[in-house]
Image (cartoon, rainbow, N blue to C red):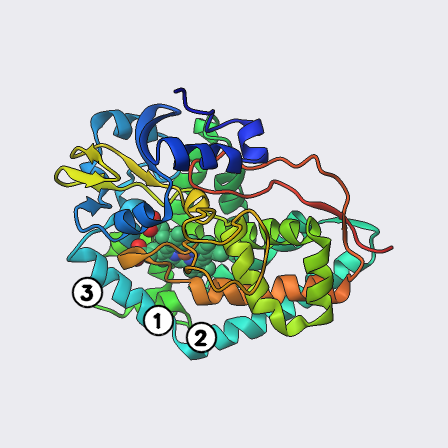
Amino acid sequence: MSLPPLFGPAFDADPYPAYDWLRRNAPVTKVPLPGCEAWLITRYADAVTALTHPALAKDPALGSPEWFRAQLGLPLDHRSTLARHMLNADSPDHPRLRRLVSAAFTPRRVARLRARAEDLTEGLLAVMAAKDEADLIADLAYPLPIAIICDLLGVPEPERAAFHHLASVIDSAAASEIDQLAAATDGLERFLGDLVAHKRTHPGDDLLTELVRRPDISPEELTSTAFLLLIAGHETTVALIGNGLLALLRNPGQFAALKKDPSTLPDVIDEMLRYDGPVRNATWRFPTEPVVIGGQEMLPGEPVLVSLLAANRDPEAFDDPDAFRPGRVDEPHLAFGRGPHYCVGAALAKIEGEVAIGGVIRRFPDLELATDDLVWWPSNIMRGLFSLPVRLHK
Ligand code: HEM
């Protein structure tokens, strides 16, 4: 029984048949990935067990030497000033860091970000309206979330272009472009370190200012947290808008239904997250002791990935899982994870998705895909498109 290929353009174009095969034949199995082997978990019930398992830890220092070598040079390489954040932490650091950030996501701040997202989207759509064709990634999905992260962190206006540039290299460089990635990561490390220092002397009404005032977070944790919010909050939201609009354009019946009743938008967004979500695999986990899931024993240090895409198409959890069908009454999807590391920014992400996707279909009700020739990011963790060319008008 040989495994189907789990990376490459053909897999990326439609990974779901391979995930279906894995769920049926090898639901918890070791798979070869570039540079190392990892356990891959594909069934919904096993995914929930793994994401909530107390002996599957997040600290990268627990990873095997083989895994560690395979990560060197990647953006989340173990630079201490960028890696000391909650998604790499276990108790007691994880709940401390998570509480600090969650407390700074006040309803008032989130409401303000919605208003900002609406203004920004209006501006971006107005620019697009002058054209016949547009790229929904470059023209909308990419610029909106990065501007929102800049607001959240309080990046001063004159610094934003430099910040965008560094973030875009990290977002789009292939893993093989190690030198470029390393230079951009170093640049971002300096940028965020300077930003944290700036907030101490020039406080603003932003999340970073709130964090620098707290005595219970170290300077390295502050820079790392800013880095995490940038990475976790940016590419994911780009992919929600891109993958979500692609699903809608490929399901014209659902597109028509949404235009007829726009109040169903939150359900449509939720189904977009389940059907083809932004996070392919949850981030790395490492057993701290032998852990048995799905009858397989995973040993300490062996890297473990939970396939959120596969779990979200499990027929044991979702009726007719390959259908794009908003308004489901199945299990909750796992696009934002589950358990202690459940996405801190889920509410904000949904707001951005609603504003961007709602805005684009209101403004361009005749929107159509301009090509089926789409290129996906070559990432182990993320699932998103480099571009999404569309015709805007009939
Ligand atoms: C549609 C967009 C988004 C998706 C699909 C998404 C998905 C996820 C997932 C799956 C995790 C858990 C990863 C794991 O357990 O390995 C996570 C964690 C996280 N997300 Fe999101 N995310 C999105 C947007 C955002 C935004 C906008 C922010 C903040 C601005 C954010 C901040 C975070 C943080 C800080 C964590 C770490 C939580 C922890 O370790 O306790 N995310 N996200």
Asked if the residue at tag 2 contacts the one at tag 3, i.e. Cβ–Cβ closer than 8 Å, the answer is: no
Q: What residue sits 44% from the left and 79% below the top? A: 108
Residues 298 and 361: in front is: 298
**Does residue 171 appear in the picture of this structure?**
yes
Q: Residue furthest top?
A: 2
Q: Which mark is residue 216?
A: 3
Q: Nearer the viewer, mark 3 or mark 2?
A: 2
Residue 94 point in image, percent of width and height: 22, 57
Residue 210 point in image, percent of width and height: 33, 71
Q: What residue sits 18% from the left and 38% below the top? A: 62
Q: What residue sits 78% from the left and 62% below the top? A: 365
Q: Amino acid at mark 3?
A: Asp
User: Left or right: where does residue 6 sit relative to residue 165?
Assistant: left
Rounded to the nearest angstrom, the CA distance separating label 1 from label 3 is 14 Å
Q: Residue furthest right?
A: 394
Q: Amino acid at mark 2?
A: Arg
The residue labelled by disc 1 is: 104
First of labels 1, 3 by sequence position: 1
Residues 289 and 215: in front is: 289
Q: Which mark is residue 109?
A: 2
First of labels 3, 2 by sequence position: 2
Name the element at disc 1: helix
Asked if the residue at tag 3 contacts the one at tag 1, i.e. Cβ–Cβ closer than 8 Å, the answer is: no
Name the element at disc 3: loop
